[in-house]
Image: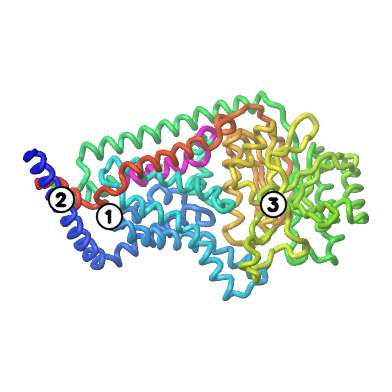
Amino acid sequence: MILLKRDYLEIFKTYSLRIEQSRRLGNYSKLKIRQIDISKIILAIVSGLLLTGSFPKIGVDLLAWFAIVPLLVALRNLSFKNGFRLGFLSGLVHYLTLMYWLVYTMKTYGHLPLYLCIPVLFLFSAYLALYIAIFSAILTGICRKPIVCFFMIPVLWVSLEYLRSFLFSGFPWELIGYSQFNNLYLIQISDIFGIYGVSFLIALSNAAIFITFLYLTKKNRQEWVVSKSIVARLIIFFILIFGLVWFYGKWRIESIDNLISASPSVSVTIVQGNIDQEKKWDTAFQNETTEKYIKLSLLAKEHKPDLIVWPETATPFYFLYDIKLSNMVQKGIYDIDADFLIGSPSFVRSKNSVEYYNSAYLISSSGKVSGKYDKVHLVPFGEYIPFKKWFPFLGKMVEQVGDFRAGNKGNTISFRNYELGLQICYEIIFPDLSRAMTKNNALLLVNITNDAWFGKTGAPYQHFSMAVFRAVENRRSLVRSANTGISGFIDPAGRVIAQTDLFQEAVMTKSMPLLNKTSLYTRFGDIFAIVCLIATAILIMILYGRPLWSPETTMISKKKI
């Protein structure tokens, strides 16, 4: 009995001493942070700028492979709270410089004064920055050992990207993996892991460089540093993973090319009308706009396309409701003798209300409607106003109609002997929508959009880059028709066969292969991202609450008490 009491007393003393040491360490860390906070702030800002630089328009995709490293370096020795703050700063810098085009759009077409546009941009960027803030804060609490950090960094990064894809309706704009849309060999793993597989690889690269940095900059071997053997193993592991991804991509492209050569094809024409957004909804220009699209489509007649695609809301009127203009379109289609897919607003009357839709019609060569698709994922403040009661001063970009209603997810349009999977505007940035249509037997993906809202900013280039992954994930050809650009053709391997310039009239015809193969991603979806999310939750429960990410912390834990 006496021994038990002594044991308990010893345990209590040990526990009390550790608490006191941790408290002292916390005070020391806070003092150290005050001395070097400027350097940490600079590193966080550098990370934000490097992340932005990896995306179009700048588009130096190499930057993504080490863009997070300055932030990771800055997070050393920080508390949870300060890690959150530093991550928030880095994220805010990144999204302010990436999403700057929102100010142009809101001011030019939303008619908001500049003094409101800038705060709205800050609020939206602040929301997106929260994900990097949470990433940073969690790392400060659980990254005690090099191996834990090495694996936790990519797993946590992917988990937060996945959450961003659906929380609050979702906005997975330019996830870090999208920066590699031109690296064909590396993005082929998307047909297994989706965009999140590429994001994981990039985050793993950042982790490997960070761990290597810790080893190369160690001051003495008593600090929490990485041993040479651990560094070597982790670098070899990353090189092995990178090599496997590269060789898989090389092999996959060759196998897809073999499938393409043995597959049927369809001849598709895209028409880029380059209609000024200021004139688009002006009733005085409705005839001019309609005639322009018909004349441009006539230029493709000699190529005898199977399908001609017009952009989102190419007809600035309610098709089939405005009889005169609808007849003009149907007559033009009949004269050209091809099937048309055209964007148009539509509505359905009920007893008590009118429901509006952002739609696309498939019209046969005889001029009859043979299919219709209603947009599923609507643009907040563009097609409906969320939280109207709280933000009454915010209006929609499209003022001519009421709030749009959403269509049904996964709906396809039957075209001849196969199905078309259609996404309107920014629906293309949501992988689950393309996947749902492919699972519903769509053999050709079509994206129609009107990016005139963005002007000559980086947004049209960013938007186009994300479409590449929908083709690779589902192994389908993708056709994109945009009012002012960028329009283009993407094959099932993710190659951009042809694309237009911005703000130019264009008519292009290409033969697109129709692959009827189901990829692992199409079959199982974002299972990889979900596994990362579950792993993150488990690791946080196991590791959180341990000594903070600090060499001094590890030194204390090693001392005899």
Q: Secondary structure at mark 2?
A: helix
Q: Is residue 222 magenta?
A: no
User: Closer to the camera, 330 or 434?
Assistant: 434
Label placed on residue 449: 3
Q: Amino acid at mark 3?
A: Thr
Q: Which residue is mark 1?
A: 76
Sequence-earlier tag: 3 or 1: 1
Q: CA gap, disc 2 to disc 3?
A: 59 Å
The residue range painted magenta reads 191-209
Q: Alpha-carbon neighbours of circle 2 within 10 Å: few (<14), some, or many (≥20)?
A: some
Q: Position of residue 150 (x, y in %)?
A: 32, 42
Q: Position of residue 507 (x, y in %)?
A: 75, 48
Sequence-earlier tag: 2 or 3: 3
Q: CA gap, disc 1 to disc 2?
A: 16 Å
Q: Position of residue 415 (x, y in %)?
A: 79, 35
Quadrant into which the N terminus falls:
top left
Q: Examine the image and state in which quarter residue 147 appears.
A: top left
User: Closer to the camera, 410 or 277?
Assistant: 410
- The structure residue drawn at horizontal position 69% and vertical position 48%, both measured from the top left corner, is 424
Q: Secondary structure at mark 1?
A: loop
Label placed on residue 278: none
Work out whether residue 500 can be spotted: no
Q: Which residue is mark 2?
A: 556
Q: Is residue 510 above or below residue 505?
A: above
Q: Nearer the viewer, mark 1 or mark 2?
A: 2
